[in-house]
Amino acid sequence: MNALSKDLTKLVKMIEKIESRTGEPDRFRTRFHLAPPAGWLNDPNGLCQYQGLYHAFFQYSPFDVEGGLKLWGHSTSRDMLHWEYQGAALYPDQPFDCHGVYSGCALIEDGRISFYYTGNVKLDGDFDYVTEGREANTILVESGDGFRFGRKQLLMTNEDYPEDVTKHVRDPKVWKENGIYYMIQGARRKDDVGEALLFASSDRIHWLLKNRITTKEPFGFMWECPDYFEIDGKKILSASVQGLEGEKWKDKNVYQSGYFEVKGHVAEQCTLSEYVLWDYGFDYYAPQSFETEDGRRVQIGWMGMPDCPEHTNRTIEDGWQHCFTIPREIYVKDGRVLQRPVRELEERKRILAEATGGLYVEEESVYEARIAEIKENQFHAVLGEELILEYRDSRFEMRFINPSKDNASGGRTIRYQEIETLNNVTILTDVSTCEVFVNDGEYVFSTRFYPENYGLQIQADEAKIKMWELVS
Ligand code: FRU
């Protein structure tokens, strides 16, 4: 540990203590969704399960609730629902990561966790910070237990990336396949086209560029946080894309997170399918996945949105901002890629109400509601008197009654997606988060919300409705 990280360690603890002492009633703190003790959180990083314990690291700015210098925060869990904060893990304490320990991943092998991340450096001067003035370094740091870390090793600099990409290259995700290590990184080309860079290595330290993956037609100017995994014979390339424009993206978020199905091998010749969104709500970005020890593919997203001054989060008043989504199992059924909350949530459910056609429950703020066997697309729900979920005009909508910033919506308005037939809806609410899984999670809508009064009202003629409270 150098002098800088020593002092930063002390300062982070100090600010966390001060924030925990302010005595404000932390009205909107989530019970099961990982949130920072103080300050700002964004992307999930280094997700893994090691010797039974789940580790989630996160982009963390403890000193600035609006986002500032990024460290990696660290939390652990036995069930992906109860998270214990372990302190800051990686500090921007080296010349090659001094303006942020940016996003990255974990690779478990031979009793060791290798963390790969981007070291962000912003040079002083008159630069555009796109084609110049910035360094994106690929860094490896290893750990034998997930809590103590070895020396940071600089593996690649901008010199190792192709000539025609800008300085925006980041967010390595590493996996091993047939004895070869692969690393995928997001990039912005100089002609403002987004792509993914695919590197390979035989020793996980020395890397060579093998492929550049993009769509036939330009698709956004930057791809962030790429991820790659195979599930049920499907090859999934996930990317958080910036710069999508045109009619299709109207009424959608400023940036998107979704996936392509890959035909061929990512390191060789391959083509990408149409892009499918992971989430159609207001708050979802930079998801990362990992494999649990029992073989599930679990994905966690940042329940927030960068560069979106139109929306606010009422937790800022309480000294913290943003949280993760509920960890979601990705699975394939009848050829469709679906999402559902991790099965550990089943053990937290206690039945509250059961009804046919309609239900009204007051005050509950942490619950799951399942509306099954929906007839003729009839569905209307109101959450906390402010948030409406509804099927109308051949689409499923999530919309706020009052879109003003000082209200439950924090400035959010409407999101929707065309859906031919509505079969079922699962609503998961955790104080200030709401995640809606439509048709067994083929479509998901996530949002933060800040209601004054809680409660749930559902109208869905003849549908079977069940509601559970979620207990700690
Ligand atoms: C995505 C992102 C990443 C980057 C990190 C910095 O939200 O911009 O590309 O590594 O956040 O916090």
Image: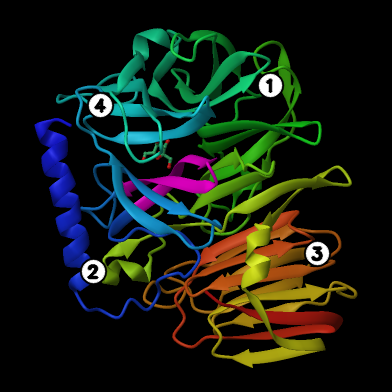
- Type of residue at label 1? Lys
- Type of residue at label 2? Ser
Q: Nearer the viewer, mark 4 or mark 2?
A: 2
4 or 3: tag closer to the N-terminus: 4
Q: Nearer the viewer, mark 4 or mark 3?
A: 4
Q: Which residue is mark 4?
A: 121
Magenta stretch, residue numbers: 41-60
CB within 8 Å, label 3 to label 2: no
Q: Secondary structure at mark 2?
A: helix
Q: Which residue is mark 2?
A: 20
Most common secondary structure along the magenta stretch: strand
Is residue 53 located in the magenta-colored stretch of the structure? yes
Q: Quadrant where the N terminus lies?
A: top left
* Percent x, y of residue 40: 32, 54
- How much space separates mark 3 and mark 2, taking CA atoms? 47 Å
Q: Which residue is mark 3?
A: 394
* Percent x, y of residue 438: 74, 62
- How much space separates mark 4 and mark 3, taking CA atoms? 48 Å
205, 70: nearer the viewer:
205
Q: Which residue is mark 1?
A: 216
- How much space separates mark 4 and mark 1, taking CA atoms? 32 Å
The vertical placement of 375 against 107, above or below, is below
